[in-house]
Amino acid sequence: MKYDRIDQQLFIENRKRLAAKLAPNSIVILQSNDFMPRSADGFHEWRQSPDLLYFSGIDQEESVLVLFPDCVKEDFREVLFVKKTNEYIKVWEGHKYTQAEATETSGIKKVLWLDSMPTILNELINLADHVYLNTNEHDRYSSPVMTREDRYLTDFKRDYPAHSIKRLAPIMKDLRMIKQDIEIALMQHACNITKAGFDRVLDVTKPGIWEYEIEAAITHEFLCRRATGHAYHPIIATGDNANILHYNENNTQCKAGELILMDFGCEYANYASDLSRTIPVSGRFTDRQRDVYNACLNVQNAAIDMLRPGTNLDAYHKEVGKVMESELINVGLLDRTEVSKQDPARPLYKKYFMHGTSHHIGLDVHDVGHRYATFEAGMVFTCEPGIYISEEGFGIRIEDDILITDGAPRNLMADIPKTVEAIEEKMNTA
């Protein structure tokens, strides 16, 4: 991996927090991610299962983590199985974890080769009263492709039909929603790298540049700073492209007078960042662009201040909608009288702001979490209001990553230029 090794104390503490939430005499079995085939003999870029990494720091394929806090065999309360290397693998794939390196990374003393797992795991499973297995229970997950976890669950039911299987996913949502100090530091580092990418964009953007050239400039800054890469496919949308929410062609030339909506973020040590900024190709906003931009920024400032303990996403989004409604009236996109007569179930502001304002972020860009959970200190959310005006050929989105604290929210992207004045000054400084 490109990134510096993460302090093993994070994984040790995460395992302790998990153990406190398990039913007595339970075993947890976590699988690494598969290599996903692309075509011919090629595979898509591999990425570790966030949950296995969360408890071990092991960033390597064909790894299995077994946690059994109440095991009568004390040496087997934490067991990590990793792929045994050989000279052939070393030549073709490079270095793999030694057992000592896996222990140093994870803090787990019992590290065994994967080929020894069937016999050992069979005994441990039969000693347990409950078996926790993991599945993807993200609200918006839907896929026809079976994962390694899916296959293991199917095989487990066949091989151990009398055992009690429990869902790990609800516990993972509870744990991963609240970021630990080490995680917050990693996310802050990812945001700092993202800032470098945006600073570079402000330096190179001018009429005639292509969207993909901007993407390339961002990618260069990320990789030079040891980022894993992009946390998601970057959106570089000039002009009316900004009104396509998931635009990712990035193949249009940027023209004088247009705005560019950019949505990108670096991934560092498997932790994501997520930034949106909108800038003028020519380095100066028009009066109309400035007014709409400031309206969007007003919404974001109000929304950030709402990210405090005690509310939840559903209530929060409704309150943000009210602020957006007011700002859209101020810039002439909504009529106050028509708004007073609107169907509350179909608010008129949704024509110009059709997506949510915030989502959890962490080891995944759209991180796991309970949608109706009350906000708590340690949660990290994006905050990304947008105003999209297809009839005027531009769209604006402004997004930062926000840490909820016991006091005021902490903006992990506070140092990234955001106001009209800051953006124009940076773009027009020789």
Image (spheres, rainbow, N blue to C red):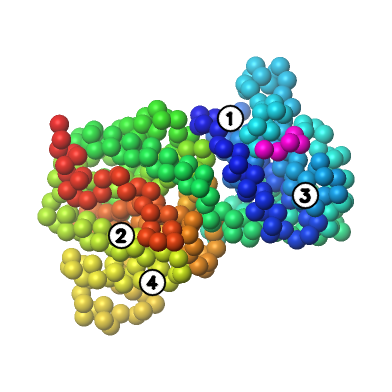
Q: Earlier in the sequence, mark 2 or mark 4?
A: 2
Residue 253 percent coordinates (x, y): 25, 38
Instruction: Using a 10 Å C-alpha cutoff, classify the residue at mark 3 as few (fewer than 14 neighbours), some (14 to 19) or many (20 or more).
Output: many
**77 in the magenta segment:** no
Q: Which amino acid type is marked by label 2?
A: Gln
Residue 68's tag is 3
Between label 3 and label 1, give the one nearer the viewer: 3
Q: Which amino acid type is marked by label 1?
A: Gly
Instruction: Using a 10 Å C-alpha cutoff, classify the residue at mark 1 as few (fewer than 14 neighbours), some (14 to 19) or many (20 or more).
Output: few
Residue 318's tag is 4
Residue 235 percent coordinates (x, y): 36, 44
- Residue 335, quarter of the rendered image: bottom left
Q: CA distance from mark 2 to mark 4?
A: 14 Å
Which residue sits furthest front?
407
One can see residue 59 in this view: yes
Secondary structure character of the magenta stretch overall: loop
Residue 15 percent coordinates (x, y): 67, 48
Q: CA distance from mark 3 to mark 4?
A: 43 Å
